[in-house]
Image (cartoon, grey):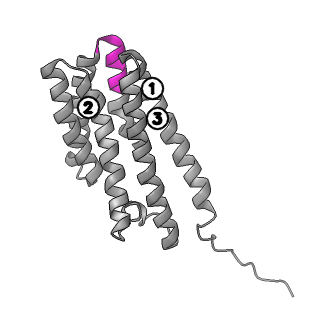
Amino acid sequence: MKLLLDFLPVILFFGAYKLADIYVATGVAIAATVAQIGWALWHRQKIKPVQWIALVFILIFGSATILLHDEFYIKIKWTLFYGLMGSMILGAVALRKNPIKSVLGQEIELPDHVWRKLSMAWGIFFLMLAGLNQYFAATLSLDAWVKVKVFGGSALSFVFVIAQAFWMAKYLPDEAVVQTPKES
């Protein structure tokens, strides 16, 4: 359910784009993101830094898209967002910090070298997404870019997360083996 809520602004963006245009879709994405953060605050949930950054980006670049009536800003939003995320993660790793562990470390137990590789992989992945978005934004029609952004980006992210889950599985601690008393 949480995953669906995380993707809700993108899903609503795509639906609004198909029903209207990029400007209506951008307004819907802004409203959905604000509502998403508002709902989380209302329910006293912790808002992650990446969610605040995403909110700021959609407010700035989405508003510029609508006010200037120029699709460039919503397209560049993703390049800059992914670029910032990748740079922040790799910068933190260079400073011997581990942003991925700080987000997931409460839920998963992994050796430090695995957390470091995981953070580096996420940083590189985000930079790759930034480059791909910029390439597609510059070379594809708006309609094709929206489809690639919504479906291609989501598919790439899904495959990346699944691949990491398989890779991490070999480092997860074994479950405690239940001992049964031996009969004499």
Q: Is residue 129 visible?
A: yes
The residue at 48%/72% (across/down) is: 112
Disc on res. 44: none
Q: Position of residue 75 (x, y in %)?
A: 30, 28
Please tell me how crowded label 1 is: few (under 14), some (14-19), or many (20+) other residues with Cα within 10 Å.
some
Q: Is residue 110 visible?
A: no
**The disc labelled 2 sits on which kind of residue?**
Ala
In terms of secondary structure, where does tag 1 sit? helix
In this rendered view, identify the residue nearer to me: 165 or 148.
Answer: 148
Which residue is denoted by mark 1 in the rendering?
148
Assign the N terminus to one quadrant of the image: top left
In terms of secondary structure, where does tag 2 sit? helix
Please tell me how crowded label 3 is: few (under 14), some (14-19), or many (20+) other residues with Cα within 10 Å.
some
Residue bounds of the magenta highlight? 12-21
Residue placed furthest toward the right: 184
Assign the C terminus to one quadrant of the image: bottom right
Dot 1 or dot 3: first in sequence order is 1
Instruction: Choose mark 1 or mark 3, whichever is in front.
Output: 1
Disc on res. 32: 2
C-alpha separation, residue under disc 1 versus residue under disc 3 = 9 Å
Residue placed furthest toward the bottom: 184
Instruction: Choose mark 3 or mark 2, whichever is in front.
Output: 3
Per the image, is 149 magenta?
A: no
The residue at 59%/71% (across/down) is: 173
**The disc labelled 1 sits on which kind of residue?**
Val
In terms of secondary structure, where does tag 3 sit? helix
The residue at 26%/28% (across/down) is: 74
Q: Position of residue 50 (x, y in %)?
A: 29, 50
Disc on res. 154: 3
Whether tag 2 and tag 1 are in contact, CB under 8 A, the answer is no
